[in-house]
């Protein structure tokens, strides 16, 4: 399953990272990567190589692209969007980053090699709300607030695909392709709320199990194997999950999310479904095997969950006491001391901890770079040299 879960929300620090092994919060990783995120996180995406994390936010600079290796904010040389970035998506080959924005331009597609913008001959004419590349990278679906509500572009020349089955009936918030590319699901604000296209001829598929019962859809995501489609919305039941084979609705035995759902994220093996919503507990995690709810993470987000995204290749890189007590005083007794972790190549401070009365400490980071752990002699009395411990990537 996805090793980490990223949850974006509307209060500082604006995003959280949970380790799915024990659902603990990786605050150290946030300290390392969080300096440039200064407003509500609207969307998040990871490039296929797992080296870049793109955040769409509600205030300037509206887009932050973060390098996972060193936590640095990538310079977007051609300029960032000029309004709310409501959707972000990397192309399957990682060469492009598409951003749906709230102000003129509305669609921004960057070449990730040099961060120049591609020219879109006929961009959307209204507030961009979502973007989604097809699994083969040949098409880009853009959902937005005004008619025609959805444009599917041929990426080769940015021409628009003809939607023979008709456009969605109203503002389209988000779209998502099935893993095999044969279906495109689009959710929106107007009944029937969910439109699913057969991409072989762009006709609309009949949802034999019925349309979602709640209004104002805010999220839709196919499971990694394409057998299920989850849809979040703003009124009860807040979450609908379909069996794609017959479009019947699945019974959520563990109960419904508590309120408006803004985002959905499947783990990469499809075993978990994370639901980000507007009221406490802000994130709900389902065990797909029986649709029970997992116990809430120990530390929940402090504000509305605006996006939820599992990672695949990332792991937390832990530095901690493994045998005995590693922080000792001059009498070889366990000591409470300041412990700092820095990147050995750059000297950048990655994390600061304080060992406990047993001399133990633990640090979780995303970077595997070579590090130095500094043990500081911050006790009164005899002055001793600080100690440095070299930690190699592993």
Image (cartoon, helix red, strand yellow):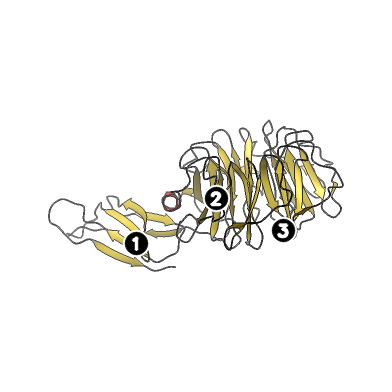
Instruction: Name the spot of residue 46 as percent of width and height, x first.
Output: 58, 55
Q: Residues within 10 Å of mark 1 (few under 14, many from 20)?
A: few
Quadrant of image for the C terminus: bottom left
Residue at the outermost top position: 235
Q: Which residue is mark 2?
A: 5
Instruction: Name the spot of residue 297 as percent of width and height, x first.
Output: 50, 44
* Precedes in sequence: disc 3 or disc 2: 2
Q: Which is nearer the eye, 115 or 340?
A: 115
What whole-number distance in Å separates the C-alpha atoms at marks 1 and 3?
40 Å
What whole-number distance in Å separates the C-alpha atoms at marks 2 and 1?
28 Å
Q: Which is nearer the eye, 130 or 101?
A: 101
* Precedes in sequence: disc 1 or disc 3: 3
Q: Which residue is mark 3?
A: 135
Which corner quadrant of the image does residue 293 belong to?
top right
Which residue is located at x 86 percent, y 45 percent?
A: 165
Question: Can residue 382 be seen?
Answer: yes
**Mark 3 residue element:** loop
Q: Which residue is mark 1?
A: 347
What whole-number distance in Å separates the C-alpha atoms at marks 3 and 2?
22 Å
Instruction: Name the spot of residue 251 as percent of width and height, x first.
Output: 72, 40
Which residue is located at x 20 percent, y 60 percent?
A: 332
Up the image or down, 206 lies above or below 373; here it is above
Which residue is located at x 84 percent, y 41 percent?
A: 208
**Mark 1 residue element:** loop
**Mark 2 residue element:** strand
Q: Which is nearer the eye, 96 or 69?
A: 96
Q: Residues within 10 Å of mark 3 (few under 14, many from 20)?
A: some
Q: Residues within 10 Å of mark 2 (few under 14, many from 20)?
A: many
């Amino acid at each position: 399953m996805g090793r980490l879960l990223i949850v974006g929300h509307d209060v500082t620090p604006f995003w959280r990272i949970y380790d799915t092994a024990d659902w603990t919060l990786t605050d150290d990783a946030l300290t390392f990567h969080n300096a440039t995120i200064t407003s509500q996180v609207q969307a998040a995406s990871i490039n296929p190589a797992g080296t870049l994390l793109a955040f769409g936010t509600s205030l300037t600079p509206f887009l932050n692209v973060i390098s996972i290796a060193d936590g640095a904010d990538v310079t977007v040389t051609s300029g960032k969007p000029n309004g709310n970035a409501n959707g972000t998506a990397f192309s399957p080959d990682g060469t492009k980053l598409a951003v749906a924005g709230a102000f003129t331009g509305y669609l921004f597609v960057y070449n990730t090699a040099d961060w120049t913008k591609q020219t879109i001959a006929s961009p959307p004419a209204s507030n961009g709300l979502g973007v989604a590349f097809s699994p083969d990278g040949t098409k880009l679906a853009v959902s937005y607030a005004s008619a025609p509500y959805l444009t599917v572009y041929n990426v080769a020349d940015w021409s628009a695909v003809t939607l023979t089955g008709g456009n969605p009936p109203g503002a389209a918030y988000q779209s998502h392709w099935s893993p095999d590319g044969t279906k495109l699901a689009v959710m929106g604000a107007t009944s029937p709320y969910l439109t699913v296209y057969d991409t072989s001829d762009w006709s609309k598929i009949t949802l034999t199990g019925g349309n979602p019962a709640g209004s104002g859809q805010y999220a839709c995501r196919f499971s990694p194997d394409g057998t299920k489609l989850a849809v979040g919305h703003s009124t009860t039941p807040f979450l609908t999950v379909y069996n794609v084979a017959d479009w019947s609705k699945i019974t959520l035995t563990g109960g419904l999310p508590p309120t408006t759902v803004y985002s959905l994220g499947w783990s990469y093996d499809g075993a978990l479904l994370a639901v980000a919503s507007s009221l406490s507990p802000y994130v709900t995690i389902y065990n797909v095997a029986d649709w029970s709810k997992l116990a809430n993470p120990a530390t929940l987000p402090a504000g509305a969950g605006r996006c939820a995204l599992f990672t695949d290749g990332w792991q937390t890189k832990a530095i901690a006491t493994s045998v005995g007590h590693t922080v000792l005083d001059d009498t070889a007794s366990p000591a409470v001391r300041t412990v700092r972790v820095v990147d050995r190549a750059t000297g950048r401070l990655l994390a600061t901890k304080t060992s406990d009365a047993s001399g133990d400490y633990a640090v979780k980071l995303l970077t595997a770079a070579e590090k130095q752990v500094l043990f500081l002699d911050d006790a009164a009395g005899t002055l001793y040299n600080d100690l440095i411990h070299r930690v190699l990537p592993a």
